[in-house]
């Protein structure tokens, strides 16, 4: 069975409305254009002419016979009208392939009306152009250098015209050409304006529509603790400094009075990196390899190396240890180091500062106590405890019925440390402390699992908004 649609009825083609008929005729026009473009010589295009033009055309007879068979009256009318359009389309294109004589133009009188018909055809085509693609197709059909209608008219009619009609054909040709160029340009401008209007309408803002609600974020609970602690110590005259997270063993251990093989290294010896750039830190021994700092205390040494007393600094930052993650431990966590050194700092200053900080941070009703402890870089060393914030010191599950909660380690700076930074240990004294930011935040907000800080669960984070 043939695939040629002209050999089938509309019902066989599944076409049952006017739009379907219009599509069939559009396809035929494309088919005609392709055949005409493929015609390489006169023989070829005369074959096209036979197929498509005149009442004897087999194709056109098929179209009318098959597409009006069995269809409704309305649909048949539509087929006839579309067919008229196809005839005009085909005649126009084939007409300009004919010689002047064949086209009956050797008489100057018929030149005017014939060119007026061409102009009308063009005007109808350009009126049907609704977008840039339509317009480009029409422009190509009429003005293309190789096979456009104007080129055909020029080579088939104008150039071979005998002297008697040449002038008239020439004038008519120029008028038609000017008309086509000008009409193409103004239709293009119209299409552009219309496209802009459509875009504007589409993009017009409706100010009465409800706005886009952007949910506000909030500061992470750890950040809030950092800011609160910084606020308290800034009010006491401390400044905030930052230090490197990648440290040398010298600053992390040795200058803090923790020599190699000292047992205090046991729970910290971790995360070493054989980085090629770990070559001596300011000429200090033991510079390589680098490690991820295990506490913020190295900044005590770095700060004292840089400045003479009085020193009053806090150092917030990240630290790393090989602790297994659990409800109170992370392998990465945050500390805030504190250091105060001057000529006459005593244990009383230390105690007063610690008490002030704890009351400011946890509330006025909270009491503190100091318990003896050990750090190689402080002497004496203490653990600072506070009365349990959950039971007020009466005893509960959180404080294991003791009424006290351990807060952080601290002490008076060991004079051995001054030796590493060229401070006169006989003249200067001071204290230091190291706060665990996750633990203090857990206590303040009764958070039972330290891992919650890093899981990015908004249900947890929203509670601190
Ligand atoms: C130190 O790190 C000392 N550098 C503190 C110090 C500074 C003492 C200055 C004296 C003078 P410690 O190892 O105890 O101390 O750690 C301090 C705090 O860090 C602890 O109280 C605890 O709150 C917190 N911490 C320790 N290990 C972890 C961990 N794995 N996860 C979360 N927090 C931790």
Image (cartoon, rainbow, N blue to C red):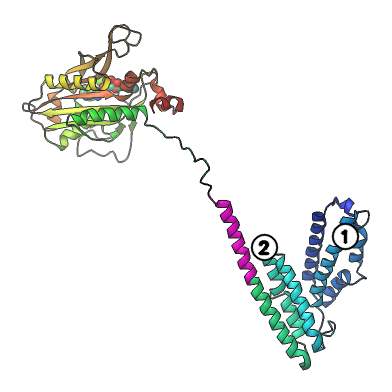
Question: 59 or 377, which lies in front?
Answer: 59
Q: Residue at the bottom extreme?
A: 163
Tell me the chief SS of the magenta region: helix
Is disc 2 surrounded by few (<14), some (14 to 19) or many (20+) residues within 10 Å?
few
Task: Check disc 1 and report its element: helix, strand or loop.
Answer: helix
**Marks 1/2: CA–CA distance:** 29 Å
Task: Count the marks.
Answer: 2
Q: Does the residue labelled 2 lie within 8 Å of ligand 1?
A: no
User: Which circle, 1 or 2, is nearer the viewer?
Assistant: 1
Question: 334 or 216, which lies in front?
Answer: 216
Q: Can residue 195 be seen in this view?
A: yes
Task: Check disc 2 and report its element: helix, strand or loop.
Answer: helix
> What range of the chain is rendered magenta?
185-206
Disc sitting over residue 77 in the figure = 1
Q: Which residue is drawn at 16% across and 19% down?
A: 351
Residue 247 placement (x, y as % from top left):
27, 33
Horizontal relation, residue 422 to residue 174: left or right: left
Magenta span contains residue 200:
yes
Query: Going from the N terminus, do you reach mark 1 or mark 2 first?
Result: 1
Ligand 1 picture quarter: top left
Specify the quadrant of the image occupied by residue 58: bottom right
Horizontal relation, residue 262 to residue 3: left or right: left
Which residue carries the number 2 mark?
A: 133
Horizontal relation, residue 229 to residue 423: left or right: right
């Amino acid at each position: 069975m043939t695939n040629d649609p002209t050999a089938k009825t509309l019902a066989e083609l599944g076409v049952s409305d006017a739009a379907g008929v219009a599509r069939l005729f559009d396809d035929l026009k494309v088919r005609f254009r392709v055949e005409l473009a493929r015609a390489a010589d006169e023989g070829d295009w005369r074959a096209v002419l036979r197929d498509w033009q005149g009442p004897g055309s087999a194709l056109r007879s098929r179209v009318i016979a098959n597409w009006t068979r069995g269809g409704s009256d309305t649909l048949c009318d539509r087929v006839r009208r579309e067919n008229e359009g196809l005839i005009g389309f085909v005649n126009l294109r084939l007409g300009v392939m004919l010689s002047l004589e064949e086209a009956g133009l050797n008489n100057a009188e018929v030149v005017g009306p014939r060119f007026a018909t061409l102009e009308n055809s063009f005007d109808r085509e350009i009126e049907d152009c609704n977008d840039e693609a339509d317009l480009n197709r029409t422009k190509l059909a009429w003005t293309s250098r190789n096979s456009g209608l104007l080129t055909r008219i020029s080579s088939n009619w104008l150039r071979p015209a005998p002297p008697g009609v040449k002038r008239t054909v020439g004038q008519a040709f120029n008028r038609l050409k000017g008309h086509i160029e000008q009409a193409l340009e103004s239709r293009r401008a119209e299409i552009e304006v219309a496209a802009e209007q459509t875009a504007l309408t589409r993009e017009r803002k409706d100010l009465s529509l409800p706005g886009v609600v952007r949910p506000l974020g909030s500061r992470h609970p750890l950040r809030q603790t950092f800011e609160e602690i910084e606020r308290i110590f800034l009010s006491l005259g401390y400044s905030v400094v930052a230090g490197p997270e990648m440290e040398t063993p010298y600053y992390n251990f040795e200058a803090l009075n923790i020599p190699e093989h000292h047992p205090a290294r046991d729970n910290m010896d971790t995360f070493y990196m054989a980085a090629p750039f770990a070559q001596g830190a300011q000429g200090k021994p033991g510079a390589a390899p680098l490690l991820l700092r295990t506490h913020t205390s190295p900044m005590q040494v770095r700060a004292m190396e840089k400045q003479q007393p009085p020193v009053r600094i806090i150092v917030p930052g990240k630290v790393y240890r090989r602790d297994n993650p659990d409800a109170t431990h992370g392998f990465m966590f945050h500390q805030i180091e504190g250091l105060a050194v001057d000529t006459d700092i005593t244990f009383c200053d230390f105690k007063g500062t610690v008490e002030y900080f704890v009351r400011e941070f946890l509330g006025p009703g909270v009491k503190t106590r100091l318990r003896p402890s050990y750090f190689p870089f402080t002497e004496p060393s203490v653990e600072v405890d506070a009365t349990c914030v959950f039971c007020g010191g009466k005893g509960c599950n959180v404080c294991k019925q003791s009424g006290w909660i351990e807060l952080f380690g601290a002490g008076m700076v060991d004079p051995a440390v001054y030796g590493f930074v060229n401070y006169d240990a006989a003249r200067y004294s001071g204290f230091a402390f190291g706060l665990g930011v996750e633990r203090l935040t857990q206590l303040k907000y009764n958070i039972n699992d330290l891992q919650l800080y890093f899981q990015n669960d908004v249900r947890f984070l929203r509670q601190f908004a």
